[in-house]
Amino acid sequence: MRLVVDLNKCQGYAQCAFLAPDVFAMHGEESLIYNPQPAEDQRERLARAVAACPVQAITADGLDGAGEHAAAGRETSDGR
């Protein structure tokens, strides 16, 4: 899995750092640092972080289906 953040688009909202702190971190108030090749066990957190970015600055190759799987888990957990 390969992660790319468009740092020109990134506005420092830090939703990614909140949702996947092992992959993303804020350095100071506005500078984002991240691991471009996160561990496989971060897949679900990373999918949520990608989806939560307000400016869609994050892309992840090899993440297909992780967000759908997380959403399906939420739907089935309440009996629907």
Image (cartoon, helix red, strand yellow):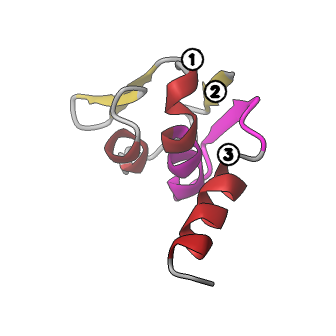
Task: Measure the C-alpha gap from mark 1 to mark 3.
Answer: 17 Å
- Badge 1 local density, few (<14 within 10 Å), some, or many (20+)? some
User: Does 76 sit left or right of 17 as displayed?
Assistant: right
Q: Looking at the rendered structure, which numbered label has been put on residue 36?
A: 1
Residue at the farthest left position? 28
User: Does 65 sit left or right of 9 as displayed?
Assistant: right
Residue at disc 2, secondary structure: strand
User: Does 28 sit left or right of 17 as displayed?
Assistant: left
Q: Looking at the rendered structure, which numbered label has been put on residue 4?
A: 2
- Quick check: is 52 in the magenta stretch? yes
Task: Measure the C-alpha gap from mark 3 to mark 2.
Answer: 17 Å
Task: Measure the C-alpha gap from mark 1 to mark 2.
Answer: 6 Å
68 or 33, nearer to the observer: 68
Name which residue lies at 71% across and 36% down: 63
Q: Which quadrant of the rendered structure holds the N terminus?
A: top right
Q: Amino acid at mark 1?
A: Pro
